[in-house]
Amino acid sequence: MFTRKRQEEPPRTIALLTDFGLADPYVGQMKGVLAKKAPACPVVDISHDVAPFNVVQAGFFLASSYEHFSRDAVFLAVVDPGVGTSRKIVCVQVGERLLVAPDNGLLCLALKRAQTAEVRVFDVTAALDAPKNVSSTFHGRDVFAPLAAWFALGGRPEEIGPEMSADELVCEHGASRISVPVRHSAMCCTSIVSGTACSTSKPETSVESVAFVLLRQVLK
């Protein structure tokens, strides 16, 4: 299935987002697969410090990042608590960009931010059948990375699986929780839509105070 496509256009960027961290070799193994299968395609790290299995946080990182990449970039997001189960693998096409992830709610926020007319959703679970050897616990290396490389070389999601309705995506995590990670840059990030948080009469000076105010507005 993942036969190399002849690449006539400039290489597409591949963006990676995982919860693997950098202390272990897993990100490096994924990048090794990408380099072997799509050596001309640049690979950019969005983050590998998503909290373990935190689908909501990963969804926010992806939704807040994908618009800043080239219009034909391929995004590979692997935060996969359901690896080894019957969960689907899905690809959301937003314009010419392709967002690939497990069907566990990770893509829902990005889907909500996209223009509806530009969006198509595909079930690409059949990609599981392409590699000869697939680890039951590391689909990121054995399935997702070859799939992303194939897309970056010109493969199309409709060549792998059927188009599906966006309503069929698992989105149960999307609106039920909110995270306020305080990043190393001292930026306080939330998934609150602009304009929905109330201002306070007194200026808040500390990061902790800002986080408290935002949470209070959401939870009250």
Image (spheres, helix red, strand yellow):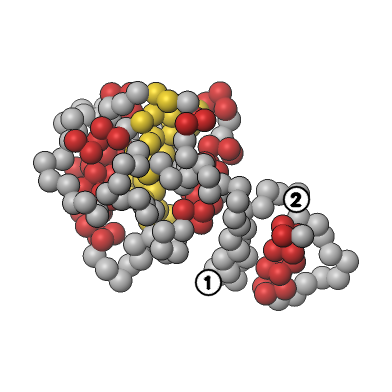
Residue 171 visible in the current orientation: yes
Residue 150 visible in the current orientation: no
Answer with left or right where residue 39 lies relative to residue 91: left
> Which residue is denoted by mark 1 in the rendering?
184
Residue found at the far right of this picture: 201
Say which of 87 and 55 sits in front: 87
Q: Which callout, 2 or 1, points at the residue further toward the start of the chain?
A: 1
Residues under numbered marks 2 and 1 in contact, where contact means CB atoms less than 8 Å apart: no
Say which mark, if any, is on residue 125. none
Across and down, in percent, residue 123 comes to 36, 31
Say which of 194 and 126 sits in front: 126
Residue found at the far front of this picture: 86
Question: Which residue is located at x 25 percent, y 32 percent?
Answer: 126
Q: What kind of residue is marked 1?
A: His
- The mark closer to the camera, 2 or 1, is 2
Q: How many marks?
A: 2
Asked if residue 151 is positioned above or below residue 206 in the image, the reply reads above
Across and down, in percent, residue 219 comes to 72, 60
Answer with left or right where residue 152 lies relative to residue 109: left
Answer with left or right where residue 74 lies relative to residue 84: right
Question: Which residue is located at x 52 percent, y 30 percent?
Answer: 167
Q: What kind of residue is marked 2?
A: Thr
Q: Residues within 10 Å of mark 2 (few under 14, many from 20)?
A: few
Across and down, in percent, residue 68 comes to 51, 45
Could you give the CA–CA distance between mark 2 and mark 1, rounded to whole angstroms?
Answer: 25 Å
Question: Which residue is located at x 58 percent, y 60 percent?
Answer: 179
> Which residue is denoted by mark 2 in the rendering?
196
